[in-house]
Amino acid sequence: MKKKKKQARIRNSILLAVLVIAAFVALKLASSDKYAQTRTEVLEKYLSYMDTGAVTYEDYLESTNGNYVSDSAKEITVKAADYKTADMEELKQDGDIVWTAGAGSITYEFDVKEAGWYYICLTYDTDTDSTQNIVRNIRVNESRLFDGCDGIVFSRLWMDDNKNWLMNTDGNQAAPTQIQKQGPAVCSVSSADVDSIGAYRFFLEKGKNTVCLESVQAKLGIEKIALVPAKEIVSYAEYYENLTKEGVQTISANEIDGGAVMIQAEDTTVKSTSSLSPNNDRTSVKTVPYDSTYIVYNTIGGSNWASVGQSMTWTVTAPKSGLYKIGMRFKQYLNRGFISSRYLTINGELPFAEAAEIAFSYDPDWVNGYLGDDNGAYYFYLNEGENTITMTATLGELTKAVDLVSESVDNLNDLYREITAITGTSPDLYRDYGIMVYLPQLQDILEVEYTRLNAVMGLFGEEYGSANKTSALNDMMDVMIKLIKQPNDVAKYLSNFSDSLSALADWVTGINNLPLELDYLAVCGEGYKLPKANGNFFENFAHTWNSFIGSFTNDFKVHMTENETDRKQLDVWVTVDTRTEYDIIQKLINAAYADSEYDVNLSMVQADTLLPATVAGNGPDVAIQASYSMPTNFAYRNAAYDLTQFEDFEEVFSNFPEGVRSFLSYEGGVYGLPDQLSFPVLIYRTDILESAGLSVPETWEDLTSMIPYLEADNMSVYLASNEYLTLGGSSSSTTMPVNPIFLSMLYQNGYELYNDDNTATNLDQTELMMVFKNWTEYYTNQGLEYSVNLTTRFRTGEIPLMVGDYTYINTLSISAPEISGKWSIAKVPGTKKADGSIDHTAAAMIGTSFIVSSTVEKDGMLNEAWDFLKWWTSAQTQSNYSIELKAADGEAAEYPVANIAAIRDGGLKDEFKEVVLSLMDDLKAEPQIPGSYITGRTIRNAFVTTVSDNVDPIDTLYITLDAINTEITNKRQEFGLNTAQE
């Protein structure tokens, strides 16, 4: 197989180089520029360089040359049930709602009376059992008018489950649970990036027009779809002038009770993501409400309100119609030297152009100020009664700058792979590799990309000049200049090129980070004076002193009803790592057991204390989020309860992959339930495999045969060898698991790690040793590395395939957004059987929950403990915990649920979810037997010795087997079990 050259990209690059040759007269003279371009010059001059065959929204607007409709034009609405055609896998009408899901599309027809620009507005409902993004493609008159018509996201709306905590300083408060809003939402088709353009405008001719929604992901309930006449967005000056000409009055502070309508920022009406949960701020005496010691939820946002597109909506009741100022107490202390911008709408509409990008500057302290510009505060028109204010994180006009850099990162990654295909990743510094012979377009591509980044620097130099925000661009440009001048020194600069390229990719991620924390909003009348943002010396001193004293007196347990002495108690211990996790579990327990006849006492402990405390008679009734080896460790000592004794056990265990049962089994019993789950998958770069003409490997043989073709271009494969993911609370006695790659290979060949009665290992059998040999030869013969900077090398394409833990999907999505859509997952490579089928068995890892038999029987709480275990591992509770964890710690806090229904209803993309769910029947766990803790460690040592010293793998493994069998024998004797010698 030969690699397909990207001829189109090369031709485009050369053409673009010709277009910008004049710009490089200055480049030849110096390596630094005075970035004097204006924003208009930059956008006009350089946006055309994004020549990828794509049709941008800007291209569409320019090519259409359309007009706005007259003021008399009316909204055109079609009910959901009145669709023209529908070709959907799942189409169901429920009253006025038409539910669409699965593959297919639904089309609506409109009779447009006047040609012009229109918004497409959808009134929709969501399936609250799922948390997936709802994604659709939009086709107008059977055409994809521009790229933005693909991947339109219809947000799920979230809200607090109650407001009892609001303004409550009576003890430590629990943050409200985030639940999905039921009922209709209204959304205009728009960019997910929410830049300064707002909702998309579509030009429609007079007569019949169609709008088609193609299903991409998740269920969507449609109530109605409308064409809304688009209005030209005016400047603030025009907006204010028009209103005053109409006789609209500015509201005086005297006309409002207290001079202003105060809205606590944490008192949101709806928000676009569950991660926008209230925060507890104890940094300032002026935060409302305030307590120096207790956990009081009094702000919202911060690092959790940082991603482009995240929005919050507040409801404000205006005493009368008129013009108001909007003040806010905010803190923008995380985006040092830069601004965080917000797109603001009133009652769903952008009031004026400047409201599309309201900037909040960096300040380490709280700030109180009015929304406005250098000329003063803005005045906003509000109707008498209820109004909504929505703010959405946005890059504004810098969206275009980020698009330019993202395109450069993409092109430079391609170029880097072209270079390393010739030189390798560690080239000889004293060779030129004939680079200009094999890659004659090198200078042309670099010149185009230099010009592109120079354009971006022009944007930043004019309005956003901040050294820490542009250093990555400068470094990349410096390296490119050196390579343009001295292309034959590519080996000398390749390392710098790679590092700068990684930094540039990180820049794209970082620039999209727009944190902003809010305390309150003040809808003010004229003459109102905003409160001071920060306390004076004496107030701050008192705050510090009270906080210090409170640290000794406050136990920081969230507010809950005091236990009655005559009520039964169920003691639950959890081995989580953070206080946040504990608080979330406590909150879920409080909600679930509020009306229970017994109390659930949750304690956060170190995993190492569980077994000693139980042996001493002071253990819990139930332990949750424990490591995979803990239930059987307790079972060896008759300290864990056999769950098969419950009549409904099999029904309950059917909620989980059957293959993980062996983790929890001992001598015919099952001693726990899984509450976390992970396993290996194949993760691969779709774009690179396609360009190289390679297929996704189905088997290990396919993967092995693919490696030489990748190595010919100095690319490689990665197999997880160093990462041993242990879920649940780990203790010093936690077993090191057997490497999941090796174990998967073993199971796929039909072999077992231990003999039938679990008295000895089977690793001394020739067939199993050959599996170990085949595994190690990926490193000794094929040259795979076992320790790499995985994220960097996957994003650059040096490693386009890897077999690793499936939880890495979320890590990759967060840390490398620039390659979104360019990678996917598949089942772990399999082994072909005699009948031609392929065995894709994958080694699983779990976290567990179990019942401590000695304690629960003493307390007489066995049935209550089982009910708790079922509640904790249920799909609803696991989903709620995952949602709450994201609400507290952000989108990166993905909880690997074990309940299959919770996985099905979770937020994974459909393409990933399909693979993950298909693997549920292929999972198999490493059996836990007395003494098995040494197996993983021994195999690991044999692997490291084989790979590091390049010695015979079979001999190396064989000489370690006595240690495994001896330990198994000793432990079985200790627990009174038969041994291999008996």
Image (cartoon, rainbow, N blue to C red):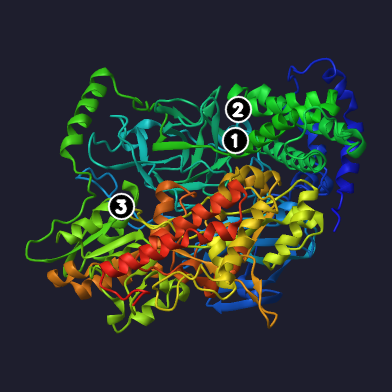
> What amino acid is labelled 3 in the image?
Tyr
Q: What element carries label 3?
A: helix
Q: How far apart are marks 3 and 1 (CA)?
A: 33 Å
Q: Distance between the residues labelled 1 and 2?
A: 8 Å
Q: Nearer the viewer, residue 585 or 336?
A: 585
- Residue depth check, mark 3 versus mark 1: number of the one nearer the observer: 3
Q: Do the residues labelled 1 and 2 touch (CB within 8 Å)?
A: yes
Left or right: 678 as drawn, with respect to 350: left
Q: Residues within 10 Å of mark 3 (few under 14, many from 20)?
A: some
Numbered circle sitting on residue 582: 3
Instruction: Judge whether 612 appears above or below 647 on screen.
Output: above
Q: Is mark 1 on a helix, strand or loop?
A: helix
Q: Is residue 803 visible?
A: no
Q: Residue at x 16, y 70 (%)?
A: 597
Q: Nearer the viewer, residue 542 or 573?
A: 573
Left or right: 662 as drawn, with respect to 508: left
> What amino acid is labelled 1 in the image?
Ile
Q: Do the residues labelled 2 and 3 touch (CB within 8 Å)?
A: no
Q: Which of marks 3 and 1 is nearer the N terminus?
A: 1
Query: Which residue, given by chain and number where applicable, does mark 1 sit on?
Result: 511
